[in-house]
Amino acid sequence: MKQKEIALAGAAAAAITIATKLLLSSLKSSLSSRDGGREEGIHIRVKQSASEILKQADRMIALSQSVHDAVAAVPLDEVSYETVIAPLANLEAEEFAVVQGCVFPSLVAVSKDVRNASAEAEKKIDAHNIKCSLREDVYLVVKAYAAKKETLSPQAQRFVDRLIRDYERLGLNLSADTRRKVEFLKTTIGELCIEFQQNMNEENRRLYFTEEELAGLPKNFIQDLKTGKDNKLEVTLKYPHYFPIMERCKVGTTRQAVAVAYDQRCMNENVSILEKVVALRHAMAQLLGYRNHAEYVIAIRMAKSPSKVKEFLESISKRISVLAAKELTKLRAMKKAEEGNDLFGMADLRYYIRKAEEEEFKVDYETVKQYFPMAVVTAGLLQIYQDLLGLKFKEVPNPQVWHPDVQLYSVSDSETGERMGYFYLDLYPRDGKYTHACVCSLQPGCVQKDGHHQLPVAAMLANFSKPTKEKPSLLGHTEVETYFHEFGHVMHHICSRASFAKFSGLRVEDDFVEAPSQMLENWCLESDSLKLMSGFYKDTKQSLPDDICQALMQKRRAFAGLLTKRQILFGLFDQSIHMRDKAETGAILKELVPKVMEGIPMLEGTNFSASFGHMTGGYDAAYYSYLWSEVFSADMFEAKFKGNVLSKSAGREYREKVLAPGACKDAAVILRDFLGREPTEEAFLRSKGLL
């Protein structure tokens, strides 16, 4: 949709418009200065100094302020699309990349000063955005325009409806006193969430073990460890150390020590932060007319109500309990046989699941890793996505990036050559970097004021083992699944074709956003795609042997009961803390863990909620989404791809009907369009071995 230039009524409005244009000109000038090396179409600055970040934040806040002032100045009897809606839509498109350029460095920057400045900028921007979202004068002007009921395109009407809904969900239809309280609460919550995440990013605890205490770990893993105090080997709590130890260390006391330390991360700082956030969220929800925060959050999701979520989680938990109990009995017997102790704990779960799978499916995961060197996995993954979705990727030489490890790719349509967007890959851990795997939308795909489509830009962050002089980075099979899953989010963002930034890419309902990527995890369990992503690291022409492919495919249902129970545990904990006025997280976990996990107790002296980043990263009261959306992912896969994961026709339909709409349609509509019917749970239950 081509949007016209802003036209405002009145001399005061005209003056504000001039000021806005000057600010926008200044902002664009600052974006282009000292910014050589950026590709055409990329507006985000990914490498800025601490002072530049803070200056950019101030400029963006000033621009946003001027636009909101201009909209508020429109007389209620002169409202129009061009004077009210277009300016707000254009602002959202303009500011997205600038804001991301300010806040994204907190996750990836090498310099702690830059990370701190980024976190400070994020707090300032969040506080400003909260003020803007609570402006009654702007709300009344938008409301006045909506009341005219002009005929709009479906996306434009959806944008107007969402503006009204979002304003009223923040209490703009309530008293001024209520709005002031909501603003204070929302600002405080935002600041605390940023602090929570910063603490996680800065976590750097080290543990020290003798080589004997690390028995069972591969020789090359031991060789790569640094020697620390008392000549012991130094272990971090980052993924490349944590997961191998939990899966392969034969020494139960070592696994216990690492597991406890892992679930103690940031306890001293973050437990109190999270519990304060929970109380503030509850207070805000009640001010807005909801019984609790969960009810407030879920009202605009697919599930609609906490009662439906609770029923869903408890129903799945009950149906899968028999399977989980059977699996746990087997693991307990294995521990007793190996360690002479049948007291099975959370620290034993990964080790004995891995051991049982290797015995049952005759597959050694260390051997499997040798067939997944990073370069081969990346090349195969990119080729699969290109062929499946009808795209072409091209690595950008000498790109402007935030770290030498980072790669940049351009994306185009393989048939038409149309430019589609860009993505960054930042795949290895480093101090201060975000510790999990995620995808960040850096620039939205949307129609600009001149009618051209702005290119979407995304970044994938992961923490896979770095290559050494002796060997390349080798991925475990679960890491390949993580890679494939997260890259699915990249494609969702790149392939969306929304007119408005508000509906770009990953802005679908939170309980659907994981479904497309969860569906794509199946490609890591099918022989055709596994062959394309594998090659023995000493001779990459040797793809994964057929017997290993078959073993990995057969383990699809292995320990589905306990692994699903773990997801249910996180989901129920999230719902539990967000359905009350205050939460003693440690006490809740102590009761909930054994109840859900078939009697396995919580690790003594721990509280994993202190590092449960989802609770402060946008998944509050929405963690159930992973399991909820997995139901839809199983249905989509079975209906369209089972038996032919390389089907180009199905892949193209998936791109056009699931990815391209972004959030322009409700998720329920997107699903019906793709499936040709209402979704069901049958495929999900079959995937778990329950049917």
Image (spheres, helix red, strand yellow):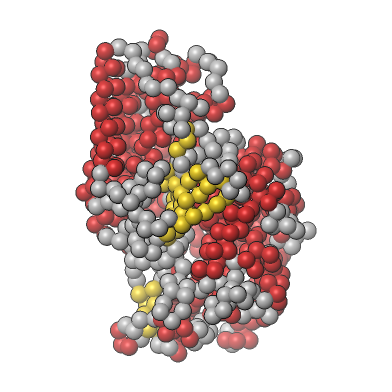
**Pick the front one: 397 or 237:** 397
Residue visible at 42% across and 66% down in the picture? 428
95 sits left or right of 263 in the view: left
Residue visible at 32% across and 17% down in the picture? 73
Kindly give the residue lying farthest to the bottom in the view shown: 212
Residue visible at 74% across and 62% down in the picture? 689
For the question of whether residue 6 can be seen, the reply is yes
Report x, y in % for residue 339: 57, 86
Report x, y in % for residue 125: 31, 40
Kindly give the residue lying farthest to the top in the view shown: 77
For the question of whether residue 200 can be seen, the reply is no
**Pick the front one: 506 or 213:** 506
Looking at the image, residue 434 lies above or below residue 70: below
508 sits left or right of 129 in the view: right
Residue 448 figure quarter = top left
647 sits left or right of 8 in the view: right
Looking at the image, residue 281 lies above or below residue 72: below
In the rendered view of the protein, which quadrant contains the C terminus?
Answer: bottom right
Looking at the image, residue 67 lies above or below residue 295: above
**Pick the front one: 688 or 599:** 688
